[in-house]
Structures are given as structure tokens and as C-alpha cells.
Image: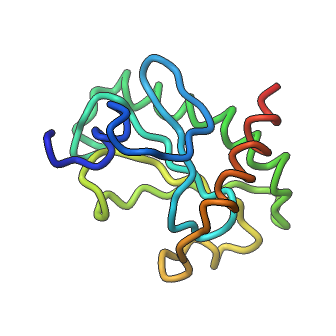
């Protein structure tokens, strides 16, 4: 999709805060995080709607989220001990999963999102990447 911001990120046309990538997916910090560490896991293959994905692709997407969620849990130590998962599908029409360190279930609320500084994002990128090692 020519106008899809996530496709442009995947092609390297737009800078982003990548924390992880493989052949099929990319994970990047949200520039408007609900909580520090709020990460988007994005398939490289463009699909508008999550339930239009092939079953195998959808399964791979969920599995790709696991090591990222584990790293977020180590780095951000959410009070609940959980990383929340949200699929909204309204902001950008390219499948993506939100992984959010949760201190309470009320943290899964887009109204709490606010723009993060580039310094904060870069600091969190480095922290998360180190948790993969």
C-alpha cells in the first residue's frame, strides 16, 4: 500500500524505533505510548484487518510477540507482571499488535497515550534490545 505508514516503515522510508525484526515481522516502540515500552508488532506483509490474515500467518504473529513481551516484562517490570495485548485496527489499516506493560487493566486505554521524546524512545530501545541478549 503506497500510503500505509507501516509499509513505509518496513521499507525504511520512515525512521522508527526498532527493537526487533525477523523475515516476517518488525517490532518498534510506539511514538505515542500508553506506557513506556509500548511496542507495535507489525507483519511485513500488508493486510488491513487481522482476521483477514491466513491462519498460519496469524499464528506466527502471536508467536513473534512472545519474546518481545518477555523482554518488555524484564525491562519495565509492570506491577501486574503482565504485558497487555491489544488489537484495535483503527489507527493504521495495517495489521499490528500492541504490547503494553501493565500496572493495571486500566492501562489498556488509548486515551492515556502521549507523545514520547526521541531521547526516551532511544533509551527504551537500548534497554529492550539488551534484554534479548
Count the marks: how many?
A: 0
Residue with the most extreme top position: 23
User: In the image, what residue occupies the spot 68% across and 56% down?
Assistant: 37
Query: In terms of image quadrants, where is residue 76?
Result: bottom right
Residue 119, picture quadrant: bottom right
Horizontal and vertical percent for residue 128?
75, 42
Name the residue rendered at 76%, 40% in the picture.
71
Quarter that holds the C terminus: top right
Give above or below for 75 relative to 80.
Answer: above
Residue extending farthest to the bottom is 111
Q: Is residue 5 left or right of residue 80?
A: left
Which residue is rendered at x = 32% and y = 31% of the image? 11
Relative image position of residue 8 (x, y in whole percent):
29, 40
Q: Is residue 66 left or right of residue 132?
A: left
Residue 31 lies, with reference to residue 129, above or below; the image says: below
Q: Residue furthest left?
A: 2
Q: Nearer the viewer, residue 42 or 85?
A: 42
Which of the two residues, 23 or 56, is positioned nearer the viewer here? 23
User: Residue 103 at x, y = what percent?
Assistant: 77, 71
Q: Is residue 44 left or right of residue 18?
A: left
Q: Which colouring convention does the figure follow?
A: rainbow
Q: Nearer the viewer, residue 26 or 48?
A: 26
Residue at left 32%, top 38%? 13
Query: Observer-nearest residue: 74 or 56?
Result: 74
Q: Position of residue 83 (x, y in %)?
A: 69, 54
Q: In this rendering, is residue 104 above or below 84?
A: below
Identify the image quadrant of the N terminus.
Answer: top left
Amino acid at each position: 500500500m503506497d500510503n500505509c505508514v507501516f509499509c513505509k516503515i518496513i521499507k525504511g522510508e520512515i525512521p522508527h524505533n526498532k527493537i526487533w525484526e525477523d523475515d516476517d515481522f518488525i517490532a518498534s516502540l510506539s511514538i505515542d505510548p500508553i506506557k513506556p515500552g509500548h511496542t507495535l508488532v507489525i507483519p511485513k506483509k500488508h493486510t488491513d484487518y487481522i482476521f483477514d490474515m491466513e491462519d498460519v500467518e496469524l499464528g506466527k504473529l502471536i508467536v513473534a510477540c512472545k519474546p518481545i513481551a518477555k523482554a518488555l516484562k524484564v525491562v519495565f517490570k509492570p506491577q501486574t507482571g503482565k504485558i497487555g495485548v491489544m488489537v484495535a485496527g483503527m489507527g493504521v489499516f495495517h495489521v499490528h499488535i500492541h504490547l503494553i506493560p501493565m500496572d493495571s487493566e486500566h492501562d489498556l486505554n488509548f486515551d492515556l497515550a502521549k507523545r514520547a521524546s526521541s531521547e526516551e524512545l532511544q533509551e527504551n530501545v537500548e534497554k529492550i534490545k539488551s534484554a534479548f541478549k
